[in-house]
Amino acid sequence: MPVIDNLDNYVVIDVECPNAKCDSVDAFGYAVVKGGVIDSFKLYYVNPEDYFDSVSLKLNNIREEQVNDAPTIDKVWDEISHLFTGNFVVGHNVTYLMTVLAKALKKHDIELPEVYYACTMELSMKHINSSSYRLQSIAKQCGIEYKSVAPLDGIKAAYGLFEYIKKNELINELTLFLNYLLDIGEISFTFCNLW
């Protein structure tokens, strides 16, 4: 597990699904944050080896023809697995994102390693009074730009929300002592949550 001595270095992720089964990935994006500033972005389109439904198309605007020739998740994992080793991961509804990723990887007999994470949705629900905790709504309330549901826009908004919560002293370094292990149950992996 990583040694986390501050909350300024982390990786923000977003995962998109082609259908309501939520066990395959058609896009994976991330941003590496160093010193509280985004250092780099990357977006992978992924061939989900699965069908696409109209609801997911409306949500993420990723079409089947965009990913037909893209690498599968096992090939993408070869390039991104280092993000989950020695870092902590931030995302909006990150438990869902990690579950989808774990299910997609499991189809290729790959297990997601134990990961420290911080969920901007959970942190918002705990520290910000709002009528909605959807990323678009809470980002707008906090003055964070969020243009669309495209993965990189979601990553930028989750990053902005995490930094907003930190800068407004809603969480701090002492929060690291509240780490706990979360067992997902039917998925055979565990990961840690930073609150």
Image (spheres, grey):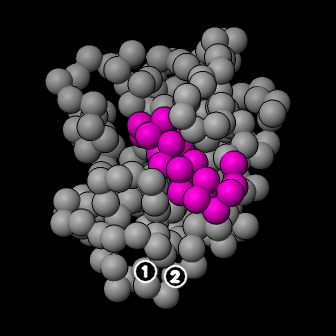
Where 75 falls versus 126 (above or below)?
below
Q: Where is residue 98 in the image (x, y as percent from the top left)?
A: 53, 43
Q: Where is residue 159 in the image (x, y as percent from the top left)?
A: 48, 44
Q: Which residue is drawn at 57% across and 73% down?
A: 72
Specify whether residue 37 is in view.
no
Residue behind mark 1: 67
Magenta stretch encompasses residue 43 = no
Magenta stretch encompasses residue 94 = yes
Measured Cα–Cα span from mark 1 to mark 2: 5 Å
Residue behind mark 2: 70
The amino acid at mark 2 is: Ala
Q: Quadrant of the N terminus?
A: top right
Q: In which quarter of the image is the C terminus?
A: top right
Where 105 falls versus 27 (above or below)?
above
Q: Which of 155 and 101 is in front in this view?
A: 101
| Image side of residue 114 versus residue 56, left or right | right
Q: Residue at x 19, y 59 (%)?
A: 55
Image: magenta residue range: 90-111
Specify whether residue 63 is in view.
yes
Q: Quadrant of residue 66?
A: bottom left
Q: In which quarter of the image is residue 23?
A: bottom left
Task: Assess whether mark 2 and mark 1 are in contact (beta carbons under 8 angstroms).
Answer: yes
Q: Where is residue 13 in the image (x, y as percent from the top left)?
A: 53, 51
| Image side of residue 9 versus residue 99, left or right | right
| Image side of residue 144 versus residue 38, left or right | left
Q: Where is residue 189 in the image (x, y as percent from the top left)?
A: 66, 36
Where 119 falls versus 27 (above or below)?
above
Q: Classify mark 1: helix, strand or loop.
A: helix
